[in-house]
Image (cartoon, rainbow, N blue to C red):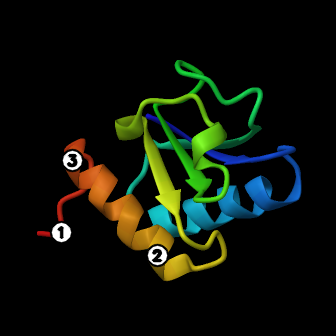
Amino acid sequence: MKIAAVCSNGLGSSFMLEMNIKEALKNLSVEDVEVTHFDLSSAMEGAADHFIVSKDLANNLKIAGDEMTVLDSIVDKKELEEKLKLFLETKGIYDEE
């Protein structure tokens, strides 16, 4: 599984989001997930299994809705972890039990 953080230029905010995704995965005790970051033009279907993006950029990302998690705030670690957990549950990668 490969998850990508996306921002407009692929520099600061997507890199910060990548680090937060890694931290959330660690908190959830999920391993064997590759995390990377992209700019909008590089984020395309097939480049990753799932994309995480802020709501202001979501309409610019040409990815199917089920392959994307949209965040209200890219700095809200609680929101990120909750939405990431839901995604991982749907893929059978995370189980709270």
Percent of width and height locating residue 70: 50, 56
Q: Which picture quadrant has residue 37?
A: top right
Discs 2/1, front: 2
Residue 61 placement (x, y as % from top left) = 61, 36
Label whose residue precedes the other's in the sequence (3 or 2): 2
Residue 62 coordinates in the image, percent (x, y):
58, 28
The tag on residue 79 is 2
Which one is in front, 4 or 57?
57
Indicate whether 51 appears above or below 81. Answer: above
Most foreground residue, 14 or 95: 14
Q: Amino acid at mark 1?
A: Glu
User: Which is closer to the viewer, label 1 or label 3?
Assistant: 3
Mark 2 → mark 1, Cα distance in angstroms: 17 Å
Work out whether mark 1 precedes mark 3 in sequence or the reverse, and give the earlier one.
3
Check disc 3: other Cα within 10 Å, few if <14, some if 14-19, many if 20+: few
- Towards the viewer: 25 or 65: 65
Q: Residues within 10 Å of mark 1 (few under 14, many from 20)?
A: few
Residue position marked by numbered label 1 in the rendering: 96
Q: Where is the C terminus found, in terms of image quarters?
A: bottom left
| Residue displayed at 21% across by 47% down | 90
Q: Determine crowd level at label 2: few under 14, some 14-19, many 20+ residues with C-alpha closer than 10 A.
A: some
- SS category of the residue bearing label 1: loop
Vertical placement of residue 66 versus 48, above or below: below
Considering the image in quadrants, where does the N terminus appear? top left
Please give the residue where the numbered disc 3 appears in the rendered image: 90
- Given the image, on which type of amino acid does mark 3 rest? Thr
Question: Residue at (76%, 64%) from the top-left corner?
Answer: 16
As measured in the structure, the alpha-carbon distance from the residue carrying label 1 to the one carrying label 3 is 12 Å
